[in-house]
Amino acid sequence: MRANDQTEIRVLPLFRSMTEDAFDNLMRGAYVQTFPPHVDLIVEGDPCDFFHIVIEGSVELFAAWNGRETTMATVSPIASFILAATIKDAPYLMSARTIEKSRIVLIPSSDVRATFSTDLAFSQAIVDELASCYRTVVKNSKDLKLRSSVERLANYLLRQQRDQGNRFDLRMEKRRLASYLGMTPENLSRSIKVLRAYGVEVDGMSVTLTHIADIEKLAKPTPLIDDKDS
């Protein structure tokens, strides 16, 4: 890995408090690779040989069963996936593919586990990361089980509004967004039409929210589902 690549990922909470020696040892077996769009990086059920970090581009995490496929998450820079399989030395529970041209850091999973056993700060950061991931899964499950499709879409748009303002572009194409929200594309289109009455304007990938209070009254956002940082 180039020095500037190491500097980029060193700021991640996972690596920030490690000793220099431990970080250098972990990076010895790591390398960076550039992938074109729509390339499968990992396959659900395969052994977890590498821990991945996205430093440019974006990656879709998805799962399939019985002829069906669903989007689980989208990973944008700078972020890692999938840590739990790496630590447990277990098969991947999701597949991953690039959405666009992407630069990915690959660290041998065996090196991550070895460093976990020897560097206290790194092991504490891993526990914190896994706890955050668990809480995210619980929130996503609550979102899917407790809300209607219109409510899920409304809260998703409000979360984007908090990050980007009242006018923003969707971060994923509508087909992938529908899958992520547990809908069919047709159901997503119907939900968008319902939200027009609440000041939601969608033009292609561009979204404008003109009546935030009306959307919030419908969506009823709560930090116990919608706060990504708690």
Image (cartoon, rainbow, N blue to C red):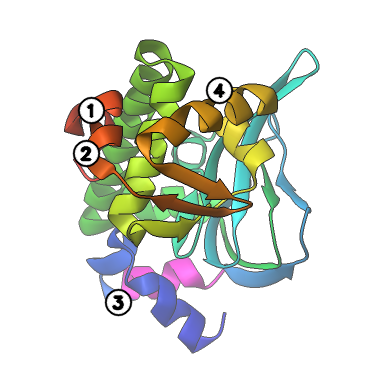
Q: Quadrant of residue 220?
A: top left
Quote the CA–CA distance across marks 4 and 3: 43 Å
Name the disc covering residue 20, or none. 3
In primary-sequence order, the first of circles 3 and 2 is 3
Q: Nearer the viewer, mark 1 or mark 3?
A: 1
Q: Are marks 2 and 1 in contact (CB under 8 Å)?
A: yes
* Secondary structure under the numbered disc 3 in the rendered image: helix
Q: Which residues are magenta?
A: 21-29
Direction from residue 182 to residue 24 in the image, left or right: left
Quote the CA–CA distance across marks 2 and 1: 6 Å
The answer to whether one can see residue 121 in this image is yes
Q: Position of residue 106 (x, y in %)?
A: 59, 61
- Which residue, given by chain and number where applicable, does mark 1 sit on? 217
- Which residue, given by chain and number where applicable, does mark 4 sit on? 182
Quote the CA–CA distance across marks 3 and 2: 49 Å
- Which residue, given by chain and number where applicable, does mark 2 sit on? 213
Quote the CA–CA distance across marks 2 and 4: 25 Å
* Secondary structure under the numbered disc 2 in the rendered image: helix
Direction from residue 64 to residue 205 in the image, left or right: left
Residue at 61% from the left image edge and 71% from the top image edge: 31
Q: Position of residue 101 (x, y in %)?
A: 71, 67
- Which amino acid, mark 3? Glu
